[in-house]
Image (tube, rainbow, N blue to C red):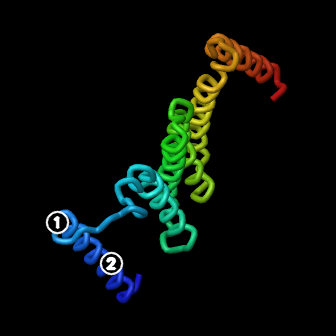
Amino acid sequence: MNRRGNMFLGLIFIVTGLLFLMNNLGVMRIHFDIFDIGYIISRYWPSLFLILPGIAMHSAFFSGRNRDAGILVPAGILLTTGIIFQLARSFRIMHLLWPGLILAVAIGLFELYLFGTRDRGLLIPVTILSATSAIFFMSVSLRPLFRINIGQVFVPVILIACGVSIILKYRGYQ
């Protein structure tokens, strides 16, 4: 931001702070019927404090201001958790979305892999975190539909898939 932009932003903060101070001290009453700052912050805090910084970090990388791909890890985590918390706050469905918090780390690491040095070692935690998140997503979303314990189905299926994979690999099919 240039000097003029910094001056303008500084003035906005000073004027806003003075208005709130005068309102809080009773010097001047400002009615926020349409623009209730408390309501906006309580309702949209994920967008303000998680999604916007995540977008700003992505923007810094993709515009070329910051060429370090490491910035994409917190950017991906902030953006994903912000979306999850905003959806949970708006629709009261955190009990369904909490596995997305595990997925947020996988997304951040995958962005580092994709736009960084392409270090294949990053794909191991990405795969583990994504699979863990998927299992938890299925367990919280399918359980009410089928009224079964997801662990009773997925653990045996995973064991069978691992066994088949080992046998095929040993016999030279892969």
Q: Quadrant of the N terminus?
A: bottom left
Viewer-proximal residue among 131 and 11: 11
Distance from Cα at disc 2 to Cα at disc 1: 21 Å
Q: Position of residue 73 (x, y in %)?
A: 49, 52
Q: Residues within 10 Å of mark 1 (few under 14, many from 20)?
A: few
In the image, residue 89 sits, relative to residue 44, either above or below, namely above
Q: Decide if residue 11 is on the left or right side of residue 99.
A: left
Three-letter residue code for mark 1: Gly
Return the residue found at the far right.
173
Residue at the image point whose x is 80% and y is 21% from the top: 168
Left or right, residue 23 beside residue 100: left
Vertical order, 42 against 48 (above or below) = above
- The mark nearer the N terminus, 2 or 1, is 2
Tell me the crowding category of disc 2: few under 14, some 14 to 19, or many 20 or more residues within 10 angstroms, Cα based: few
Q: Looking at the image, which residue is at 39% across and 53% down?
A: 39
What kind of residue is marked 2? Ile
Instruction: Identify residue for label 2.
Output: 12
Res. 26 mark? 1
Q: Secondary structure at mark 2?
A: helix
**Closer to viewer: mark 2 or mark 1:** 1
In the displayed structure, 38 sits above or below 16; it is above
Q: Quadrant of the C terminus?
A: top right
Q: Residue at x 25, y 72 (%)?
A: 19
